[in-house]
Amino acid sequence: MHCNWSHCKSRCVPVISSIPWYITIIPLLFILTVRGLKDLSNDLTRRRCDSEINSRPCDILISQSFQTVKWSDVCVGDVLRIHKDQVFPADLLLLCSSEPYSLCYVETADIDGETNLKYRQALSATHNTLTTQPTEEALASFDGVVLCEEPNNRLYSFRGQLQWQGESFPLDCEHILLRGTVLRNTEFAYGLVIYTEDCGRAAPVDTETDRAGEETVNFSAAGENVEVKQETAATEWEEADD
């Protein structure tokens, strides 16, 4: 009885699939190939777009004079000069601008879809000092220390502090110029790089741990002495506030 059942089972197996295996695998290979080529095309397009963006020019302060470099060469602690209708290559702390009281207007349509202009204003301390003498010389001697939160994806809030000339100045989102926004109705603005492309505020990160640390940017002598460090203790903010 056992042999008869095995014999019957072996005779029934070929009936399960009457179509040859190569006929079913060809469409599968075709679908996988098309999917792979599509992903490859998307990756190449994205890489080409990134290369074009990183090759855009911007003015950076080097040895008391501004020189034109690529976006990819911008580092934390650099001082940039942004002209009217130019896109910000990094997240900047606004130091001063060509407008009265160092106001400037930005368009944020590329990062939040809003077309109305928003205003940003530099601290009165940096405005008064950096606009009362030749700009390049004043910026080259700037030796402020910026304490700020780690990169996060919150576009409308910022917590930081500028330590300069023996004083501490609180910073908020009105002092920050975000990467991807455009300078409008302002001839030029000067800013200190606090976040670059790899760690910008628009980059998605774990928001539960954003407040757990801070980033320190120590800038002096036109970017010749830049130090960046990360602190993991949340109590550092309370000590800094004291």
Image (cartoon, grey):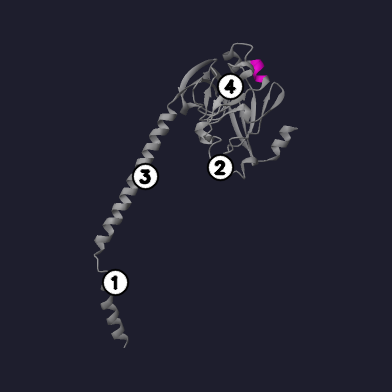
Q: Where residue 198 sits: x, y (%)?
A: 51, 35
Label 1 to label 2, Cα distance in Å?
51 Å
Disc with the residue nearer the chain's start (3 vs 1): 1
Give the main secondary structure, helix, strand or loop, of the magenta stretch.
helix
Disc with the residue nearer the chain's start (3 vs 2): 3
Magenta residues, start to end: 125-129
Q: Name the residue under label 3.
A: 39
Q: Name the residue under label 2.
A: 205
Q: Nearer the viewer, residue 74 or 30?
A: 30
Q: Where residue 70 sits: x, y (%)?
A: 45, 25
Label 4 to label 3, Cα distance in Å?
41 Å
How many numbered callouts?
4
The numbered mark at residue 104 is 4
Q: Nearer the viewer, residue 118 or 237?
A: 118
Q: Mark 1 points at which residue?
A: 16
Amino acid under label 2?
A: Val
Dot 3: few (<14), some (14–19), or many (≥20) neighbours within 10 Å? few
Disc with the residue nearer the chain's start (4 vs 3): 3
